[in-house]
C-alpha cells in the first residue's frame, strides 16, 4: 500500500510540474509578442496596421544638438525617433542619367537677413514633413503651432499618419486645409529613398501638393529637396541615390508648371562642393539629421529665393 501511494504521488507531482512549465512558457511568449506589437504600433503609427518593410529606430534627443523643449507636443516620441534609419530597406539604386547639375556652394552668400522681406515670410511660414523637417521647431526657428511634422512620415506610408491641428488629428491634406497656411514649406523623402522609385515618389509628392491647392487655392507650397547625408558616418543610403530622387522631383515640379508649387534646392546649400556629401560639421551626430546652422542657412536662402517668385504678391492679394 505504501509503495502504491508513493508511486501515485510521484506521478501526480510530475504531471503538475509539466503543466506549470507549459503554462509558464506559453505565457512568456504571448506577453513578449503582445508588448512588442503594441509598442511598434503605438510608437510609430496612428492606424492599427503597420506597413510592411518598416523598422524605425529610436535615437536619443542628443542627436539634435542644442535640443530644447519648445512646446508641449502631444506626441512625446515625435522628437526622439529617427524614421530614416530603416534597417531592412532594399538596397539603394540610382539612375546616374537623372543626376542634376549641382552648382558649387558659396557660404559667403549666406548672410543673416539677406531678404528685406524676411519678417513677412516668417510670420506666415508653416512647415510640414519628417524628423529632418522637425528640426525647424526643435531649434526654435518655427513655433510649434506652425509645425506639422511626424517622425516617420514619407510618401510611401502617408496614409498611416495624422497631424495635430486646432480641429484635432487629421491626414496631411486635411490638416493643411484646416490650418490654412499662406506659405507652406514641405520637407520629406529621406524615408522614401530606399523604398520607392524616384519618379513614383515625385509623382505622388506633386499630386499631394495639387490636392492641397484644390482645397486651398491661396496656398503657396515650397517643396524642399532631400538633404544629403554624411557618407563617412552613415551608410543608410547613397548621396547619388538621393540626387536621383531630387532630380525626378525637380523635373516633375517644373513639368507641373504651377505658380503655386516651387522646388527649393536645400541639398546644394549644405553639400560639400567637392564630395557632394553633407559638409563636415553639418550633422547633429548620426550623419542624417542636421545641425542648427543648416536651418539658419535654409531660411536665409529661402527668403531670398521667395523674393524671386510671385509668392509675396500672391499672399498679399489673398489677404486683401
Image (tube, rainbow, N blue to C red):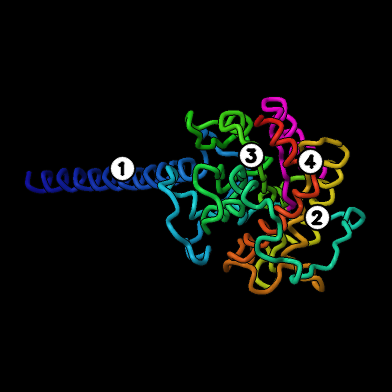
CA distance separating discs 1 and 4: 70 Å
Q: Residue 75 appears in which quarter of the rendering?
A: top left
Q: Which residue was labeled with disc 2?
A: 93
Mark 2 / mark 4, whichever is N-terminal: 2
Between marks 3 and 1 in the image, the one whose residue lies nearer the viewer: 3
| Residue 186 in view of the camera | yes
Taking 218 as reference, is 302 above or below it?
A: below
Residue placed at 61% from the left, 61% from the top?
A: 289
Mark 3 / mark 2, whichever is N-terminal: 2
Between marks 1 and 2 in the image, the one whose residue lies nearer the viewer: 2
Residue 252's spot in the image, x, y percent? 84, 41
Q: Which residue was labeled with disc 4?
A: 310
Label 1 neighbourhood size at 10 Å, few (<14), some (14-19), many (20+)? few
Mark 3 / mark 4, whichever is N-terminal: 3
- Marks 3/2 in contact by CB < 8 Å: the verdict is no
Q: Which residue was labeled with disc 3?
A: 157
Between marks 2 and 4 in the image, the one whose residue lies nearer the viewer: 4
Locate residue 120 relative to residue 97 in the image: left or right.
left
Residue range highlighted in magenta: 198-225
Residue placed at 71% from the left, 56% from the top?
A: 115
Q: SS for tag 4?
A: loop
Locate residue 289 relative to residue 251 in the image: left or right.
left
Residue 4's spot in the image, x, y percent? 12, 44
Q: Looking at the picture, tell me which residue is in the foreground, 180 or 167.
A: 180
Q: SS for tag 2?
A: loop
Label 4 neighbourhood size at 10 Å, few (<14), some (14-19), many (20+)? few
Give the main secondary structure of the magenta stretch. helix
Amino acid at each position: 500500500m505504501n509503495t502504491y501511494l508513493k508511486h501515485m504521488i510521484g506521478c501526480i507531482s510530475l504531471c503538475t510540474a509539466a503543466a506549470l512549465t507549459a503554462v509558464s512558457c506559453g505565457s512568456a511568449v504571448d506577453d513578449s509578442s503582445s508588448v512588442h506589437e503594441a509598442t511598434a504600433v503605438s510608437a510609430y503609427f496612428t492606424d492599427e496596421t503597420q506597413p510592411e518593410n518598416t523598422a524605425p529606430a529610436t535615437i536619443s534627443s542628443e542627436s539634435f544638438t542644442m535640443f530644447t523643449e519648445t512646446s508641449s507636443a502631444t506626441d512625446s516620441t515625435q522628437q526622439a525617433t529617427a524614421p530614416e534609419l530603416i534597417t531592412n530597406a532594399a538596397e539603394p539604386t540610382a539612375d546616374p542619367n537623372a543626376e542634376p547639375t549641382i552648382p558649387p556652394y558659396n557660404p559667403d552668400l549666406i548672410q543673416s537677413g539677406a531678404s528685406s522681406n524676411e519678417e513677412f515670410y516668417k510670420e506666415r511660414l508653416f512647415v510640414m514633413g519628417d524628423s529632418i523637417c522637425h528640426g525647424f521647431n526643435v531649434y526654435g526657428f518655427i513655433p510649434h503651432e506652425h509645425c506639422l511634422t511626424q517622425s516617420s512620415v514619407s510618401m510611401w506610408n502617408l496614409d498611416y499618419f495624422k497631424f495635430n491641428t486646432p480641429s484635432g488629428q487629421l491626414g496631411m491634406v486635411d490638416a493643411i486645409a484646416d490650418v490654412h497656411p499662406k506659405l507652406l514649406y514641405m520637407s520629406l523623402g529621406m524615408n522614401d529613398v530606399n523604398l520607392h522609385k524616384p519618379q513614383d515618389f515625385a509623382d505622388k509628392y506633386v499630386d499631394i501638393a495639387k490636392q492641397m491647392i484644390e482645397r486651398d487655392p491661396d496656398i503657396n507650397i515650397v517643396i524642399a529637396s532631400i538633404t544629403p547625408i554624411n557618407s563617412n558616418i552613415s551608410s543608410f543610403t547613397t548621396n547619388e541615390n538621393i540626387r536621383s530622387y531630387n532630380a525626378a522631383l525637380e523635373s516633375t515640379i517644373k513639368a507641373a508648371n504651377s505658380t503655386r508649387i516651387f522646388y527649393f534646392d536645400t541639398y546644394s546649400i549644405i553639400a560639400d562642393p567637392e564630395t557632394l556629401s553633407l559638409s563636415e560639421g553639418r550633422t547633429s551626430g548620426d550623419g542624417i539629421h542636421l545641425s542648427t546652422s543648416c536651418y539658419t542657412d535654409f531660411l536665409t536662402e529661402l527668403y531670398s529665393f521667395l523674393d524671386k517668385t510671385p509668392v509675396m504678391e500672391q499672399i498679399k492679394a489673398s489677404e486683401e
